[in-house]
Image (cartoon, rainbow, N blue to C red):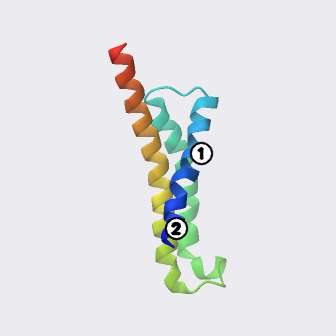
Amino acid sequence: MIATFIIAIPLILIATIPIYSLKKIKGTDRLLAAICIVLPGMLMDAVVLLVFDNIFPNLSADVDRYFASWLLWAYSLILITSVTKASFVRKNTIQS
């Protein structure tokens, strides 16, 4: 389980940074883009976690807390990539 949390870091970077580059999203607009990426999934996952037993019948009900923590981890990583990248871009434009 720890491996899935660690593997999520490069996977999120590989998935989000190219989106920002392809769409040419600069500066603080990256945070808005990250929110637009995260929000639909979070809303759907809120419903999924309420009926976890019905959607994932092969998993025990005790696993839902680990699933929820992994989802929160992945969503927070997406938001962090936008904030750190935006602050990096802002620092470079001030110095230029």
Q: How packed is label 1: few (under 14 Cα within 10 Å), some, or many (20 or more)?
A: few
Is residue 6 toward the left or the right of residue 21 in the image? Answer: left
Q: Are marks 1 and 2 in contact (CB under 8 Å)?
A: no
Q: How packed is label 2: few (under 14 Cα within 10 Å), some, or many (20 or more)?
A: few
Residue position for label 2: 3
Residue at mark 1 to residue at mark 2: CA–CA distance: 17 Å
Please identify the quarter of the rendering in which residue 92 is found: top left
The label number, if any, that marks residue 14 in the structure image: 1
Q: In the image, residue 44 lies at what x, y percent? A: 58, 61
Front in this rendered view, residue 46 or 27: 27
Residue at 48% from the left image edge and 30% from the top image edge: 29
The label number, if any, that marks residue 59 in the structure image: none
Badge 2 amino acid? Ala
Front in this rendered view, residue 61 or 7: 7
Residue at 42% from the left image edge and 45% from the top image edge: 80
Q: In the image, residue 87 lies at what x, y percent? A: 37, 31
Element class at badge 2: helix
Res 65 visible: yes
Q: In the image, residue 60 lies at what x, y percent? A: 57, 87
User: Which quadrant holds the C terminus?
Assistant: top left
Badge 1 amino acid? Ile
Element class at badge 1: helix
Res 42 visible: no
Q: In the image, residue 62 lies at what x, y percent? A: 49, 85
